[in-house]
Image: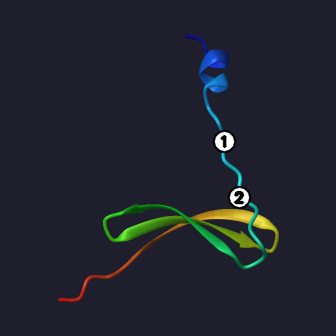
Amino acid sequence: MNNEEQYDQVEPVYEKLAPGEILIISKEGNCITYAANEQGKVVLKKACLLEDD
């Protein structure tokens, strides 16, 4: 399988975000990966919750 055939199998998913809005993409343990609309640009970020001792 060449690169072009692999690319054809990828189906991107788009979500329009309003300014200041976020979209949670995934959760791993106590961390989340999310997309945020910051002044018209989509920025991917990761945030982790701290565990209480």
- The label on residue 12 is 1
Identify the residue shown where x is 74% and y is 73%: 38
Q: Horizontal placement of 7 versus 46: left or right? A: right
Q: Secondary structure at mark 1?
A: loop
The answer to which image quadrant residue 39 occupies is: bottom right
Specify whether 14 is left or right of 6.
right
Front residue of 22/44: it is 22
- The picture places residue 19, in percent across and down from the top left corner, at 78, 76
Q: Are marks 2 and 1 in contact (CB under 8 Å)?
A: no
In the image, 4: left or right of 1?
right
Check disc 1: other Cα within 10 Å, few if <14, some if 14-19, many if 20+.
few
Label 1 sits on what residue type? Pro
Pick whichever, 23 or 4, lies toward us: 23
Camera-side residue of 10 and 31 = 10
Q: CA distance from mark 2 to mark 1?
A: 10 Å
Residue drawn at x 23%, y 88% is 52
